[in-house]
Image (tube, rainbow, N blue to C red):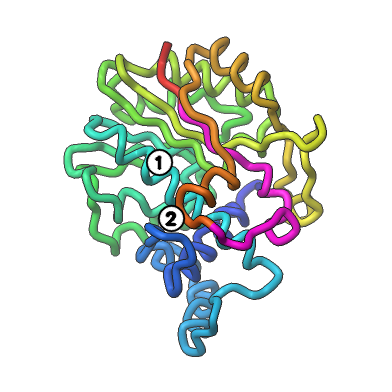
């Protein structure tokens, strides 16, 4: 993201969720609060779509990406639900995520949203108007390329001995591999017994990290990707044991068999995957 500006990808993901909530394409997808965290001009775009509900709320050029992000949301929601109860939920690169305001089962959970202060400024302006599902929400401002997450969370009242669920959605690909590894090592250091982490990462295509001209143009280029073997090694070296690893083909089979979704329709996110790991 560009310095001093809220993340463009954070806005785009929330916008896609808001549109998807009008007519969900993936069973189990729901996000009624996504629209509430958008800037006013983005809300007006959602309203225009609502006034003329088409067969699909997405423009043809990012329909595949919008449906992909519905799958990603559902899979990660299920991972969180399966791990309950836990005392702390830490969302790394939280952006405009609405889980603390919409997910059931968080009544006894403190949610820590960790992100760049510029993005959090936009989020906090809207958050005061929403009703929390979680026990409490704490905003932790951080620049992942400069700041140390351990110190930042300690300052926010994080309990190292509590069972914690870490969620890192759509963030690893924007960091260099060494920065990803450093973050995983840091959260392992902070994690109590039975803690776990669910995260997205960019897989490789023919041994190479897929690129995106669009992301480069908005100042948020892809900087890392991992093969399965590389990911397992990175997780173990950082203090985590990988237990699950899945991609869009698995999600289609499990949630919506027969859906016509292809790499061409989705774009580079076709190679984005979700992994779950527990502390070693």
Mark 2 or mark 1, which has the lower sequence index? 1
For label 1, the residue is 113
Near-viewer residue (251 or 117): 251
Residue 55: image quadrant is bottom right
Q: Residue at x 61, y 54 (%)?
A: 9
Near-viewer residue (221 or 209): 209
Viewer can see residue 2: no
Q: Is residue 95 above or below residue 245?
A: below
Viewer can see residue 245: yes
Near-viewer residue (215 or 228): 228
Residue 139: image quadrant is top left
Secondary element at image label 2: helix
Q: Residue at x 67, y 20 (%)?
A: 230
**How far across and how far down the image is residue 232, in percent?**
59, 18
Whether tag 2 and tag 1 are in contact, CB under 8 A, the answer is yes
Q: CA distance from mark 2 to mark 1?
A: 10 Å
Magenta stretch in the rendered image: 258-276
Q: Looking at the image, which residue sits at the far bottom?
A: 52
């Amino acid at each position: 993201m560009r310095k001093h500006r809220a993340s463009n990808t954070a806005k785009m993901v929330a916008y896609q969720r808001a549109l998807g909530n009008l007519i969900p394409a993936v069973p189990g997808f729901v996000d009624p609060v996504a629209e509430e965290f958008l800037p006013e001009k983005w809300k007006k775009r959602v309203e225009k779509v609502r006034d003329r509900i088409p067969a699909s709320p997405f423009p043809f050029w990012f329909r595949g990406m919008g449906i992909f992000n519905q799958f990603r949301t559902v899979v990660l929601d299920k991972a969180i639900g399966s791990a309950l109860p836990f005392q702390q939920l830490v969302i790394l690169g939280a952006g405009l995520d609405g889980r603390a305001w919409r997910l059931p089962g968080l009544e006894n959970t403190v949610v820590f949203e960790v992100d760049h202060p510029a993005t959090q400024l936009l989020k906090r302006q809207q958050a005061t108007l929403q009703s929390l599902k979680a026990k409490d929400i704490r905003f932790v401002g951080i620049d992942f390329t400069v700041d140390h997450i351990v110190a930042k969370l300690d300052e926010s009242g994080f309990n190292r001995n509590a069972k914690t669920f870490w969620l890192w959605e759509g963030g690893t690909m924007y960091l260099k591999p060494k920065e990803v590894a450093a973050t995983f090592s840091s959260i392992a250091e902070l994690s109590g017994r039975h803690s776990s982490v669910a995260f997205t990462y960019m897989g490789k295509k023919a041994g190479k990290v897929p690129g995106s001209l669009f992301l480069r143009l908005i100042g948020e280029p892809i900087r890392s990707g991992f093969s399965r073997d590389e990911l397992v090694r990175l997780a173990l070296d950082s203090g985590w044991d990988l237990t699950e690893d899945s991609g869009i083909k698995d999600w289609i089979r499990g949630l919506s068999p027969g859906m016509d979704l292809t790499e061409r329709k989705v774009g580079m996110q076709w190679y984005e995957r979700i992994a779950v790991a527990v502390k070693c």
